[in-house]
Image (cartoon, grey):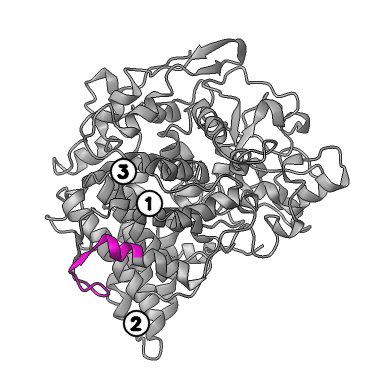
Amino acid sequence: MKKYILSLAVLSAATIFTSCDDMLDTDPRVTDATQATFPGKIGDVEALNTATYSIMNTMGGGDADTQNPFYWWEVMSDNCYGSGGLQDNKVKAMHHLVEMSSDQYQQAFILLYGGINRANNQIETIDNVSWTGNEAKRNQLLGEGYFMRALYTLWLTQLFGDVPLITSTTITEEMKEEADAETAIYPQILSDLVSAKTLMSTAKNSGHANKYVAEAFIARAYMFWAGFYKKVGELASGSAPAIDLIEQEGCPGGSLSQAEVVNGLKDIVASGAYKLLEDYRSLWQYSNSLLWDEAQDGEKHAYAFIADMKRENCFDQPGMGNGNDEELFQIQFMNASRWGIGGDVANGGTYSTARMYCNYLSCWWALRVNGNNGNRDYTYPFTQGWGQGSPSCNIWDDWTEAEKTSTIDPEKGDIRKLGSLIDCRNELTSYTFVKDDCEESGYGVKKWNGVTLDALTGDTPWWHAVNPDFKGTLDNPMQGEHFEDFYLMRYADVLLMLTELTGDASYMNQVQARAGVKQTPYSLKAVQDERRWEFAFEGIRFNDMRRWSGKDAGESCYAAQALEAQAGKKVVVKGNTSDLVTMKHMTCSWKKRYADTNGFLAKPQNQINLMNGKLKQNPGWDAANPETQYVDLYN
């Protein structure tokens, strides 16, 4: 097991937020130091770089319904319901594209601007240090600064649309104005990514970006811009326009064409630096060798789904799992969580940092089963948790229908389906529903669910058995001891983006072959399906749906229709399996809410007030309109 990118000592060298009241009220510099004198040595720049990355840990380790955009995008898609308990109103509001409070989505807004400001500081102060003899390191760190600014800005504008474009730690009045995403924000994002590509090396550095990572995200950002804003329905036609770039270090200006985006992806393929793992299951912690050993040895329980794997392909074996050859970029975690870190809610803050060093999704998406925590007869090999954002009936039903047209092993089907979802009724012993749950489909998220062993007790995750001397730092194994990387870019995405951009099915066929499904010729639908199956619950589906729809496409577009297909599905509410509830939208319809909002969230009213009118609410989020407001369907 490799260890991870942050340390508490490094974090203490860079403040997180001095206030949560203003999106611009952040200071990533060391206490009592000034921008003129800090950084003073290379190690200081590296500390700033670590602080810039750490925003991702805060999002990934905090409460998923309040600050994790990757979770949000799955819950907002047709892959997941809101579900959870009756009291879990935030996640249900999100799933129905409404709000339960005027500042529901504020925490991610603040965190992303904090990350942007840290990146700006890193870029601006890079030459406070003498780099003589270390020019390559200087360029790498500067490139990472540009990359992270682009990434945080991309996520921010995909969530909230037109927002202030902040490119300096000195905030001008002009910067406080909303920028147009299509004509101003995306050109800056792609310019930053081109700068990153130019400045960074190709060397792999655990948890950090490199040239190839930048090339992959150039494609992701460009494809969203071309599909959503320029309304290019099928990129394989080659009809997407070039986007104008901004001249800055590493980016000469000019424009970026679709052909250049394709060449960047082909550069990744030609490098041989990344590859698909032989077995899809190797990507996920449920395939760890300790659980595999239990399956082979005939212990009390045996997890049959991984019994046929090669042991050398298990998650914790060399080249597999965390740090594997398929992941280009990811959020990494380590055993350093503490209650009450920094501005955590426990200390009066409004965002959560207590578990920022663990993958809290492993608890958030974990099974909400029977209420008997730790009872292996109900959940083995999975731990239990909050059970919010449960998989929808739609993804299971759609996937099952797709399997009928594939040439696959009829006993296994598409390995990715049961590699991604827990079929609770058939995989778990004595599965029952919880009495205060709602919108339950009977499926769980296998990719991220915490995993345990017969050799452990309670809800103790398998990580405890990796090292006999392991001691969790949070003193709450169920919540704080999950260290599976969260993938932000995998090589499979490089291949599928290449097929979508070029129409060359050979790239997609590699992904299909690994899954054991029929290798098909190119069609847009084939790419759409492959992306949904391959990246289920990885935070990609919702923005794929949006770019395949185009902005202002109305209720008949791909996204609106896919979301509306949830209506009429039968789900369990309050544990009552004898009287299933028909899914319906809580205020109007999913297709109307999508059409009204284009998939953007409500900007926090608190931030609108603080910006004195410079920040404007997104269309479809008039708080006086009851269609935008949470309604309790189940109490």
Which dot marks residue 547?
3
Q: Is mark 2 on a helix, strand or loop?
A: loop
Quarter of image, res 591 = top left
Q: Is residue 8 visible?
A: yes
Quarter of image, res 543 = top left
Q: Are marks 1 and 2 in contact (CB under 8 Å)?
A: no
Few, some or many residues within 10 Å of mark 3 (<14, 14–19, 20+): many
Percent of width and height locating residue 240: 24, 53
Tell me, yes or no, whether the highlighted magenta stretch contains residue 255. Answer: yes
Q: Can residue 68 be seen in this view?
A: no
Estimate the spatial distance between the alpha carbons at disc 1 and disc 2, rounded to whole Å.
Answer: 43 Å
The magenta-colored residue range is 248-262
Which dot marks residue 129?
2
Q: Are marks 1 and 3 in contact (CB under 8 Å)?
A: no
Whether residue 361 sits left or right of residue 74 in the image: it is right
As drawn, 48 above or below 604: below
Q: Mark 1 points at which residue?
A: 500
Tell me, yes or no, whether the highlighted magenta stretch contains residue 352. Answer: no
Few, some or many residues within 10 Å of mark 2 (<14, 14–19, 20+): some
Percent of width and height locating residue 126: 32, 76
Percent of width and height locating residue 440: 55, 23
Q: In which quarter of the image is the N terminus?
A: bottom right
Query: Label 2 amino acid?
Result: Val
Query: Which residue is nearer to you in this view: 64 or 240?
Result: 240
Query: Which residue is nearer to you in this view: 465 or 196?
Result: 196
Query: Label 1 amino acid?
Result: Glu
